[in-house]
């Protein structure tokens, strides 16, 4: 009786192992088997979805202890689960993300990343899953009252941004290139905010949700009412990895339709 039980457990364990192994198979071309969702694309590391991000961007990605959490981390985890993959998050400089994805060091980039035509030349974007707004953070007593003050004739402000973000790209074009001020570029949004606190820059142009988080942590700062520009966030996938792009888009679409994406966003952003 005891041995019989053991035998059954062993058979069950073997069956589980085989089904797990089947999930990890992603080379339909070689196997010639009918392709399942998980069998139509390859990832950098078999069975693992590596997400490149820059984890100083609350509430999209930030550290809780030594773990990266946030909207992007949770949406990526939900996508990975649908694809039968294990999610691994790699934290890096924001402007290394596209290179990492294109160079095959990561499968996707997810970092509150704005879809722009320039980036679309380098990388493919998935369906958009969130919107962002570029806003301006100033000290409470600042004489900068609106975005227009930054763009006005004769303006000469020092503007802090995170390097190579859209905040950098837009202010460089609209302000620095027109001789209306200078842009100070920092590796992290938090560093730009520190420069604002110490008076090194006059304002910081950054995405609205991290802006809210940074202002909440730093008394004496506020966000201007006028918005700089509205944008769409999406995940980035290498140009030649269209099978993964399609699989992620399919998973994302399901997660948008069944309300998962909304509930993840609502969990981090108070309505
Ligand atoms: N939305 C902006 C952009 O795409 C800023 C994103 C910064 N993200 C981050 N995780 N630091 O350029």
Image (cartoon, grey):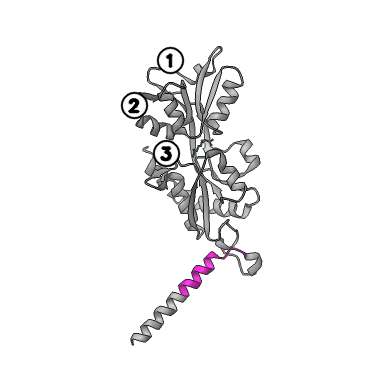
The image position of residue 21, as x and y in percent, is: 52, 69
Identify the element where label 2 is drawn.
loop
For the residue pair 229 and 22, the one nearer the viewer reads as 22
Q: CA distance from mark 3 to mark 1?
A: 27 Å
* Residue 58 marker: 3
In this view, 223 is above or below 84: above
Q: Residue at x 38, y 82 (%)?
A: 6
- Magenta region: which residues? 15-27
The image position of residue 45, as x and y in percent, is: 56, 58
For the residue pair 211 and 66, the one nearer the viewer reads as 66
* Residue 219 marker: 2
Identify the element where label 3 is drawn.
loop
The image position of residue 34, as x and y in percent, is: 61, 68
Say whether residue 112 is visible.
yes
Label 2 vs 3, first from the N-terminus: 3
In this view, 28 is above or below 185: below
Q: Is residue 2 left or right of residue 59?
A: left
Asked whether the residues under the numbered discs 2 and 3 touch, taking CB atoms below 8 Å apart as contact, a structural biologist would say no
Label 3 vs 1, first from the N-terminus: 3
Numbered disc total:
3
Q: CA distance from mark 1 to mark 2?
A: 18 Å
Instruction: Quickly name the residue at label 1.
Output: 143
């Amino acid at each position: 009786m005891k041995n019989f039980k053991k035998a059954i457990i062993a058979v069950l364990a073997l069956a589980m192992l085989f089904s797990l192994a089947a999930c990890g198979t992603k080379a339909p071309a070689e196997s010639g088997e009918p392709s399942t969702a998980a069998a139509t694309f390859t990832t950098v590391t078999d069975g693992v979805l590596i997400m490149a991000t820059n984890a100083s961007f609350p509430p999209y990605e930030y550290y809780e202890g030594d773990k990266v959490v946030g909207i992007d981390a949770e949406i990526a985890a939900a996508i990975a689960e649908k694809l039968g993959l294990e999610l691994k998050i790699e934290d890096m400089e924001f402007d290394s993300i596209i290179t990492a994805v294109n160079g095959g060091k990561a499968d996707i980039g997810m970092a509150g990343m704005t879809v722009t035509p320039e980036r679309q030349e380098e990388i493919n974007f998935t369906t958009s899953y969130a919107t962002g707004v570029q806003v301006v953070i100033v000290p409470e007593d600042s004489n900068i009252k609106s975005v227009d003050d930054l763009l006005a004739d004769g303006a000469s402000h020092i503007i802090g941004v995170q390097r190579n973000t859209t905040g950098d790209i837009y202010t460089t074009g609209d302000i620095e290139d027109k001789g209306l001020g200078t842009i100070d570029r920092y590796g992290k949004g938090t560093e730009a905010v520190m420069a604002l606190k110490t008076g090194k820059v006059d304002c910081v142009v950054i995405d609205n949700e991290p802006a809210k988080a940074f202002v909440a942590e730093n008394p004496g700062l506020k966000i201007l009412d006028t918005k700089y520009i509205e944008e769409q966030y999406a995940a980035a996938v290498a140009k030649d990895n269209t099978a993964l792009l399609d699989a992620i888009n399919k998973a994302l679409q399901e997660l948008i339709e069944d309300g998962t994406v909304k509930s993840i966003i609502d969990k981090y952003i108070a309505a």
